[in-house]
């Protein structure tokens, strides 16, 4: 039976024998996949060692202290992997998992549509089985990385007579084909981190259906559960110590490409870390009203941080999850809004400016025009409040008007 | 800092909860808040005999149970939830801590065992009719006279000031200002030169007194003129305890609002199924949980004698106070018309929220303190 010490020792020895900063990134990651050290919590038959999350964390520590590069983790590839490990066939696992780990393939998530945002199960992108192949028509939106992804995780409707959740199926869609058109979607903050994806008779081979026809919602729930757990699915590379060598350069290039869409995300959260410094720099720290507003913000941010800490400790100690674990997303929205308010107070008339004419080369302006995303992305505040009220406080659900056959359910007309 | 509760602490909490559920239903709160003394001596005795709560954070050397601010916080949270009418905050929290912080060894040995057993009711008088919680508000003087000291001046907002047997009073050396010249003094509540009058409290569960001193003879606690550190510490500890009391009351209000929203039917459905109501409840839950985190964190910091305690105390006070008031107002709103009646219990907590908001300093005062304490 593996214990922490033996696992740590084995990882350390393996890294000593194998880690080489001058190796090629692809060769190294193939070695990680073959040995199981890259994703030790995955099953033994699929590139892992079948270890617990706790023991995997021990191995991760060894990788960090050796400054060793790990498998590719950026973007939503790990959501794809987790979904396929749970619901995929051996064909899927055989064909996709290794190239996810090596970073050769990039994935995107084709869930949201112009007509179904919060109501994800109302998707109207259709998949029709015609002459033994799935033919896809419709439109997806808010698709990060679609412009350089090889595959997409697609939620599409295969049955219009079933109630909406039962008529959905889940597919792996090859992105590089004539029936798929990707267009960037420019946001109000000027960045274009997402795409719109249009399908016109796009084709999916029958073996790329994940799980069974009509079971798409259950599979999508797996993807979403991993997304919530992994903070937006956004993972940066671990960093410790100087990183000089061929493999680091290759990893950096990869990270820059994959992380590019996320570079404004810190501003979206409000940058509470800048508030006190900026208030001191501008002298507004002496203004009694500004002091009150800064204190309000910092109290909110600190108490939210400690609430997240309480939730983590409860989880680590195996105690039942209290309500504190469900509140982070909504608290983050409150903090982001309060940050935008306080940054405006501190910035004064300069809040009218952007780019190089504005404080911190546009960072403050970017906060002010990025914060509105926080209360929408990954579940709106309103949906979060419904979830908290219904699941945590046990309050009754709203009456529904979408329970019958999906073709009769009122829905948006998308032009 | 790890500030989750241990199994023993959770067990202790449920014991306190059971006792209070039995002894302090709102019928009892209503009965006692209408009395002059504001507490039931029999329940006070049981609080000591059955649970030893009056002794909780007093060291064993002085007849206490030797627990710390975390366990005291648990008690306070449950007292806040149940609104127990008792001179607990005045005697166990304020007076015991003041004596611990200011007194010399023989004074602690002499005064604390009776407070720990609940036999002695004590209180602390800091604030004056000006209502200020900073040192500049302290104008009462203590003048040396015949080997002792004579107090002159008026204290106000003194918790349980009319029932306290022992008064612990902060006074200053004549002509001193600010943090200089402050001393804690003790004297009997019925000593010569002491005139006590009950104030009409908006929150009838918290009894307040105005106390006038005319050449009242008093004994100094600890060093004369060097009482400021002890006063500051006593107030910070009280603020942490009050924050924990407040989050207990806030939770009680949220529970009540949610229970009512599930039960009350309008337009053919439970009002809790309307998003206007459930979203309000979700926001209330955030308020409660964030305020709890701050209150628990501050208590744990006090347990570890962390130098950040003054800042954390202010932070926890603001967080708890804002959460309590918002939740109280929302709880009335969700109850609708009935929530505004005397017969509905919500106003008991609403008034406690309001009196707690002002007691030991308003949120605006503590926000400014917090900024200063963080070095801004």
Image (cartoon, rainbow, N blue to C red):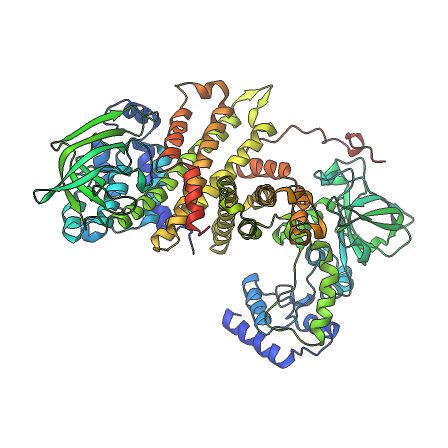
Residue drawn where x is 70% and y is 50% of the image: A357
Quadrant for the C terminus of chain A, please. top right
Residue drawn where x is 44% and y is 40% of the image: B318
Residue A102 location (% of width, % of height): 73, 67
In this view of the protein, can residue B55 be seen by the observer? no
The image shows residue B361, relative to residue B60, as above or below, that is above
- In the image, A87: left or right of A238? right
- In the image, A331: left or right of B58? right
Front residue (pair B318, B128): B128
Residue drawn where x is 31% and y is 28% of the image: B205
Front residue (pair B143, B350): B143
Residue drawn where x is 72% and y is 62% of the image: A256
The quadrant in which residue B88 appears is top left
Front residue (pair A379, B130): B130
Residue A234 location (% of width, % of height): 67, 56
- In the displayed orientation, state which residue is furthest to the bottom: A17
- In the displayed orientation, state which residue is furthest to the front: B175
The image shows residue B155, relative to residue A2, as above or below, that is above
- In the image, B135: left or right of B252? left
Residue B240 location (% of width, % of height): 36, 44
């Amino acid at each position: 039976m593996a214990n922490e010490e033996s696992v740590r020792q084995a990882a350390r020895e393996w890294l000593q024998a194998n880690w080489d900063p001058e190796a090629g990134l692809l060769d190294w990651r193939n070695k990680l996949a073959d040995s199981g050290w890259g994703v030790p919590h995955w099953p033994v038959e699929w590139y892992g060692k079948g270890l617990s999350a706790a023991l995997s964390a021990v191995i991760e520590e060894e990788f960090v202290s050796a400054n060793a590069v790990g498998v590719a983790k950026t973007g939503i590839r790990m959501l794809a992997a987790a979904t396929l490990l749970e619901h995929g066939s051996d064909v899927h696992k055989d064909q996709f998992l290794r190239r996810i780990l090596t970073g050769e393939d990039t994935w995107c998530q084709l869930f949201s549509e112009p007509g179904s945002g919060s109501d994800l199960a109302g998707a109207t992108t259709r998949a029709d089985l015609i002459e033994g192949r799935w033919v896809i028509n419709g439109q997806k939106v808010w698709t990060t990385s679609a412009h350089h992804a090889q595959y997409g995780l697609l939620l599409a409707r295969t049955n219009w007579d079933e109630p909406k959740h039962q008529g959905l199926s889940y597919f792996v869609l090859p992105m590089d084909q004539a029936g798929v058109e990707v267009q960037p979607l420019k946001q109000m903050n000027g960045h274009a981190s997402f795409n719109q994806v249009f399908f016109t008779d796009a084709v999916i081979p029958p073996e790329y259906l994940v799980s069974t026809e009509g079971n798409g919602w259950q599979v999508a729930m797996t993807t979403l559960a991993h997304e919530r757990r992994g903070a937006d699915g956004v993972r940066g590379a671990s960093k410790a110590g100087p990183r000089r060598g061929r493999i680091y350069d290759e990893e950096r290039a990869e990270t820059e490409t994959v992380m590019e869409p996320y570079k404004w995300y810190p501003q979206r959260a409000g940058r509470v870390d800048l508030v006190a410094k900026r208030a001191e720099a501008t002298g507004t720290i002496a203004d009694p009203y500004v002091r009150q507003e800064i204190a309000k913000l910092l109290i909110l941010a600190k108490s939210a941080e400690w609430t997240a800490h309480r939730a983590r400790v409860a989880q680590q100690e195996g105690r039942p999850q209290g309500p504190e674990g469900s509140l982070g997303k909504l608290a983050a929205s409150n903090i982001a809004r309060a940050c935008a308010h306080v940054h405006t107070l501190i910035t004064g008339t300069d809040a009218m400016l952007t780019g190089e004419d504005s404080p911190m080369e546009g960072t403050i302006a970017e906060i002010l025009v990025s914060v509105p995303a926080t209360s929408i992305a990954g579940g709106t505040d309103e949906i979060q409040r419904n979830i908290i009220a219904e699941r945590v406080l046990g309050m009754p659900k709203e009456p529904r008007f979408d329970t019958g056959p999906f073709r009769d359910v009122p829905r948006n007309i998308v032009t | 800092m790890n500030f989750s509760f241990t199994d023993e602490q959770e067990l202790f909490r449920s014991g306190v909860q059971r006792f209070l559920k039995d002894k302090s239903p709102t019928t009892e709160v209503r009965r006692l808040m209408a009395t002059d003394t504001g507490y039931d001596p029999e329940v006070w005795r049981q609080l000591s005999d059955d649970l030893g709560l009056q002794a909780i954070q007093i060291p064993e050397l002085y007849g206490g149970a030797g627990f710390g601010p975390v366990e005291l916080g648990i008690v306070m949270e449950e007292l806040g939830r149940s609104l127990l009418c008792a001179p607990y905050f005045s005697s166990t929290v304020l007076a015991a801590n003041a004596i611990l912080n200011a007194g010399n060894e023989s004074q602690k040995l002499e005064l604390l065992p009776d407070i720990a057993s609940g036999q002695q009711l004590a209180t602390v008088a800091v604030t004056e009719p000006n209502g200020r919680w900073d040192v500049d508000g302290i104008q009462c003087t203590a003048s040396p006279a015949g080997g002792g000291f004579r107090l002159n001046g008026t204290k106000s907002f003194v918790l349980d000031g009319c029932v306290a047997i022992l008064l612990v009073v902060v006074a200053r050396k004549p002509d001193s200002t600010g943090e200089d010249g402050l001393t804690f003094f003790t004297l009997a509540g019925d000593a010569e030169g002491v005139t006590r009058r009950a104030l009409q409290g908006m929150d009838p569960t918290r009894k307040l007194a105005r106390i006038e001193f005319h050449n009242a003879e008093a004994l100094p606690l600890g060093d004369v003129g060097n009482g400021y550190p002890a006063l500051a510490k006593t107030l910070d500890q009280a603020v942490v305890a009050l924050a924990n009391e407040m989050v207990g009351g806030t939770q009680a209000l949220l529970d009540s609002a949610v229970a009512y929203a599930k039960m009350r039917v309008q337009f053919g459905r439970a009002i809790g199924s309307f998003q206007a109501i459930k979203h309000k409840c979700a926001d209330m839950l955030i308020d409660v949980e964030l305020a709890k985190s701050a209150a628990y964190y501050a208590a744990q910091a006090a347990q570890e004698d962390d130098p950040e305690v003054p800042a954390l105390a202010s932070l926890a006070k603001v967080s708890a106070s804002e959460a309590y008031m918002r939740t109280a107002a929302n709880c009335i709103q969700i109850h609708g018309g009935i929530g505004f009646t005397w017969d509905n219990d919500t106003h008991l907590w609403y008034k406690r929220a309001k009196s707690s908001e002002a007691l030991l300093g308003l949120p605006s005062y503590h926000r400014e303190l917090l900024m200063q304490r963080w070095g801004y």
